[in-house]
Image (tube, helix red, strand yellow):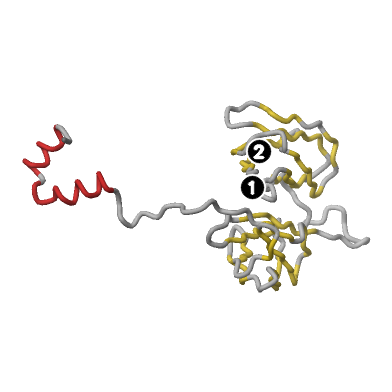
Amino acid sequence: RIGPANTISKLYHSDFRDLNYGLNILGDPSLMIWTATPSLIEVEHPDIISMGANDLTIMVNADGQALEDALVTIVTDKEFISYGYTDLNGIIELTFDAGADSGVILTVSKDGYIPYQAEIYTSITLDADDDEEDNSLPEVYELHQNYPNPANPTTTIGFYLPGQDDISLDIYNLLGQRIIQLQEWDMDAGYHEIQVDLSGYPSGVYLYRLAASEFSDVRKLVLLK
């Protein structure tokens, strides 16, 4: 017996009782459910590319085997750049032009696998006679998404500094408790990377915070073992 809802439906919704009961009790018949545990995707790719034309070779594996027909895409925050599918050996080569942005976003996905995402950063090379105040250098602080994400169990965090500065990088759980306190560094202007080992912590969602003299930003990372 459904109770008061039964009486109300008889009075006001008699034409739809079968439909209401079917959806509420039996559930949506078209609802998709997991039938197996998805596997992790392992991706090998450059961490930094140059501005201009690039031929990017990407290798995709899962469970120690080459992963065929995985969808690989290259995008930025503003536009879609290139895509393709891995071959029998789990390899794909993508050709594209990298602009003056901070980098591109690489994604790899396939049914039955946890999607992979990482940022690939654009390097800036100055000639010896270039002015020190070249406009192509980063003029603002930037904290990038960690890669690989999910981490398993190590991950790399990259960031730009517009000038020499003292920075700190800390990891927090979702309760706001600091679980990893990294030392402060006096770093030069430019792009930097720091590798973080999360092997002593359970799978889940964590936050990482970059703090400098005039900057602070927080991003989310996923740990999956």
Residue type at the position of mark 2: Asp
Horizontal and vertical percent for residue 20? 19, 47
Which of the two discs, 1 and 2, sits closer to the camera?
1
Residue type at the position of mark 1: Pro
Pointer 2 residue: 217
Count neighbours of disc 1 (C-alpha within 10 A) and say few if under 14, some if 14 to 19, many if 20 or more: many
Image vertical order of residue 159 relative to residue 68, above or below: above
Along the horizontal axis of the image, is 189 left or right of 78?
right
- In the rendered image, the quadrant that contains the C terminus is top right
Query: Judging from the image, what secondary structure is the residue with disc 1 in?
Result: loop
Kindly identify which numbered label has been placed on residue 150: 1
Residue positioned most to the left = 11
Image vertical order of residue 189 relative to residue 182, above or below: below
Along the horizontal axis of the image, is 16 left or right of 89?
left
* Closer-to-camera residue (72/34): 34
- In the rendered image, the quadrant that contains the N terminus is top left
Count of marks overlaid on the render: 2
* Closer-to-camera residue (14/143): 14
* Closer-to-camera residue (211/118): 118
Horizontal and vertical percent for residue 158? 74, 47
